[in-house]
Amino acid sequence: MSAQGWPARLTSGEVTVRPISRHDAEEWRLARRRSAAWLHPWDATVPPGGDARPTSFAALVRRLNRSARAGTAYPFAIEVDRHFVGQVTVSNIVRGSALFGSIGYWIDVEYAGRGIVPRAVALAIDHCFASGLHRVEIAIRPENSNSLRVVEKLDIREIGYAPRYLHIDGAWRDHRLFAITAEECPEGMLARLDAGGGAAAESPVNR
């Protein structure tokens, strides 16, 4: 592992998070096609004047890998039984005085409801803290009750409300903001999740 904490492969139970790869292309496309209607209301979109999003999976992976090499992202694939089932990405990583990152995710509709996302997020947060970050933030739309249940399951506190925070499904959307610092979770997020027991409900993405 590099000094910036990448690449990394982490496993807990049936869930593994590891670097997304061009070899995930077929399963990624199948998952996105199968889950299209489910994901659509929560997908990030490009506002007028914004940078264009990648138009192919290969372009997406190249962009994510550039960010990983620059130390500004940890682009994890979520894997269950050696199958790609979604993504959890730590983005906007800032070093220096901030030591901060934010987390987003999506999951294949066929794998929802099994507690996979809370476990994947816990693994990602533990990795953030192990690699030197101090604070991790998650932004969730107020309407996204299942994703709110995920942060409840992980016992991540709410820190504020951000009007028109992200461009989602064609418009600027309000978000509730949640964050956790390394001092708040000395036992580790995965240990906290396991101590809580049970499986959280899951939304397709946390937006």
Image: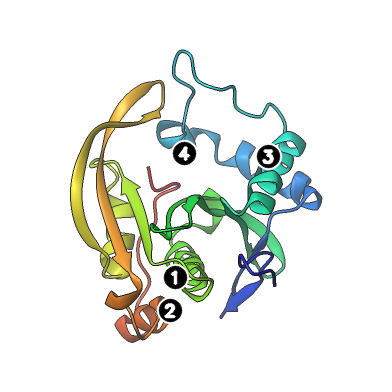
Residue kind at label 1, given as amino acid type: Ala
Mark 4 against mark 2, which lies toward the viewer? 2
Coloring scheme used:
rainbow
In the picture of the structure, the residue carrying the numbered disc 3 is: 63
Q: Are marks 1 and 4 in contact (CB under 8 Å)?
A: no
Alpha-carbon span between mark 4 and mark 2 = 27 Å
Residue kind at label 2, given as amino acid type: Leu
Q: Quadrant of residue 85?
A: bottom right
**Mark 3: secondary structure:** helix
In the picture of the structure, the residue carrying the numbered disc 1 is: 122
Q: Are marks 2 and 1 in contact (CB under 8 Å)?
A: yes
**Label 4: how many Cα within 10 Å (few below 14, some 14–19, many 20+):** some
Alpha-carbon span between mark 1 and mark 4 = 23 Å
Q: Nearer the viewer, residue 191 or 15?
A: 191
**Label 1: how many Cα within 10 Å (few below 14, some 14–19, many 20+):** many
Q: Which mark is residue 26?
A: none
**Label 2: how many Cα within 10 Å (few below 14, some 14–19, many 20+):** many
Mark sitting earlier along the chain (2/3): 3
Mark 3 against mark 4, which lies toward the viewer? 3
**Mark 2: secondary structure:** helix
**Mark 4: secondary structure:** helix
Residue kind at label 4, given as amino acid type: Trp
Mark sitting earlier along the chain (1/3): 3
In the picture of the structure, the residue carrying the numbered disc 2 is: 190
Q: Are marks 4 and 2 in contact (CB under 8 Å)?
A: no
In the picture of the structure, the residue carrying the numbered disc 4 is: 38
Identify the residue shown where x is 30% and y is 69%.
153
Identify the residue shown where x is 65% and y is 50%.
70
* Relative image position of residue 25 (x, y in whole percent): 76, 45
Residue kind at label 3, given as amino acid type: Arg
